[in-house]
Amino acid sequence: MKRFIGFIKKEFYHIFRDRRSLFILFGMPIAQIMLFGFAITNEINNVDIAILDHSKDATTEAIINKISNSKYFSVKQFLDQESDIEAVFKKGKVKAVLNFENDFSKNLIKDHNAKIQILTDATDPNTANSISNYINAILSQYQKELNKDSNVAYQVIPQSRMVYNPELKSVYMFVPGVMTVILMLVSAMMTSISITREKELGTMEILLVSPLKPIQVIIGKVFPYIFLSIINAIVIVLLSIFIFKMPIQGSLVLLALESVLFIITALALGILISTVSATQQTAMMISLMGLMLPVILLSGFIFPISSMPLPLQVISNIIPAKWFNIIIKAIMLKGVGIQYIWKETLILIGMSLFFIAVSVKKYKIRLE
Amino acid sequence: MNTNKVIQVEGLTKMFGDFAAVNAITFDVEKGEIFGFLGANGAGKTTAMKMLIGISNPTSGKANVAGFDVFKNAEAIKKSIGYMSQKFALYDDLTVKENISFFGGIYGLSRKRIKKKSEILIEELGLEDVANKLVGSLPLGWKQKLSFSVSLLHDPKIVFLDEPTGGVDPITRRQFWEMIYKAAHQGTTVFVTTHYMDEAEYCDRVSIMVNGKIEALDTPKKLKEQFKVDHMNDVFLKLARG
């Protein structure tokens, strides 16, 4: 036991004396959560638009007022002719242009229909899509007000409610995602690098010649990272509660236990990576290419798995992060208990056991 | 078993597939002896040594190190031996003192003993001024000497040195060999591999490995007489060229 404590002390010296690993350990989680929470967002806010109003009557004015009074849009410019539209888009000053046809009011009253063209800058397709949806929503709202008095037969009135995230805050989606990425990065990449570093420096050989058992060496190497990963998870949860006001609906104990389980899965993966790579460089490349990209792209963190092509959906099943992402979203946002996520939990446990078994086998072969 | 023989090896073999990296070698090493283990690159020196220090399993043969069988008792051997590899293997990002207490710790030395040992060691090596500096900032020669002292920290019966003087200047090499003599004088058996033939002259006995077999084993003096040459270098060249 005393030997073990000495070993762990040494491991902490390594971590705290290496600025690079300190940065990855503590700077990265905070930077990522801030980035995803504040800067990278799908929400529409104060988007600049331009108006080309051919009729300039009471109705168009009412619509324009309605749009510019919403917090989503601000009217930047009034255009005079069709040819101006392309120019403002090219300058990038506005993201959308509303084009009202001639005699808007007259058409509306006489023919019961008037046309507005909504043009959006689709160089950023997601934003363009949202803008057009928001404008449509405002217009249909206006239409409803117009029809308030008259009776329209056979109306279908949809009432949508966004459950679990009524304000559609993107930070609700990013916090669980960032937590998954960070835990994977810290646990798998940092352990695989720190183990291969000993191999590269030749100190691993010295440790194996010493009375320490290989298993003690490995546990000694991963233990500090379990500890640091848990601290990271706590920091992320605290940031999301206090800075982003994201409520944690489910049990914190369950969240903690599931996080520890995922940390163990990631550590086992890290050990596995270290058994197949001889240098820190290789370990880093395997961790980055083999883990980080799938974690970000295929875990459902940013891109929904259900809209991926079938082969990618199948591949996503072997990515531990996918299951963890489902679990923590369910706990954080839906507040569910273990009875709803036991299947995902079992999958993670199975994966951890598999990785540990394979690394033990590989490790023995290396010692031969 | 003869208690004066701390290493007894008989027909020790290591196969990698069909290739015999170490081919039925047989030799003994006596207590307090400086035993030179020579051979060209790829002759099988390091593989043989790895079997003796318990990090590689022999394919066949017998070997007894410090009174323990390498097949049955590899873990017990580890407590009785010290090892210094050809790569410099202390931690650069730990201070001199931290390195000493870490390695003392993993060999199970008490805190008191580590403290005492490290004071003696730092004084002997003249490292008082840099005791709290990171090892990475020391010159290579100092690191090598420190590394050797660390491998002797737990008073092992045998110390295995794998090309310990690679890359250091002649003066440091000389000092290094003085340390080896001192350790041997205090009763530690020294098992050393080297490329430098002048160093072979310092050994009590040397063995020369060629293609996995021990082709010669005797005192440097007798080997030179046997091959009718003046320097160990020529003994080595004669053997290596077949």
Image (cartoon, rainbow, N blue to C red):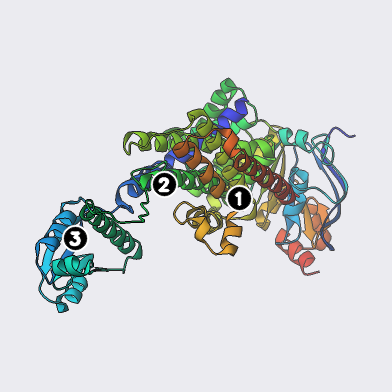
Q: Are marks 1 and 2 in contact (CB under 8 Å)?
A: no
Name the chain letter of the residue that bears numbered label 1. Answer: A
Vertical relation: A65 (above or below) A6: below
Q: Which residue is pictured at 72% across the width and 53% down the height?
A: B46
Name the one closer to the observer, B31 or A25.
A25
Name the chain letter of the residue that bears numbered label 3. Answer: A
The amino acid sitting under disc 1 is: Ser
Q: Which residue is pictured at 22% across the width and 69% down the height?
A: A115
Give the labeled residue for mark 2.
A173
Vertical relation: A190 (above or below) B133: below
The amino acid sitting under disc 3 is: Asp
Identity of the residue furthest to the top in this view = B112
Name the one closer to the observer, B70 or A317.
A317
Foreground mark, 1 or 3, reads: 3
Q: Is residue A330 left or right of residue A135?
A: right
Q: Which residue is pictured at 33% across the width and 49% down the height?
A: A35
In primary-sequence order, the first of circles 1 and 2 is: 2
What SS does tag 1 mark?
A: helix
Q: Label 1 to label 2, Cα distance in Å?
A: 32 Å
Give the labeled residue for mark 1.
A274
Q: Is residue A13 visible?
A: no
Name the chain letter of the residue that bears numbered label 2. Answer: A
Q: Residues within 10 Å of mark 1 (few under 14, many from 20)?
A: many
Identity of the residue furthest to the bottom in this view = A83
In the rendered structure, find residue A48 and report the number of the disc placed on it.
3
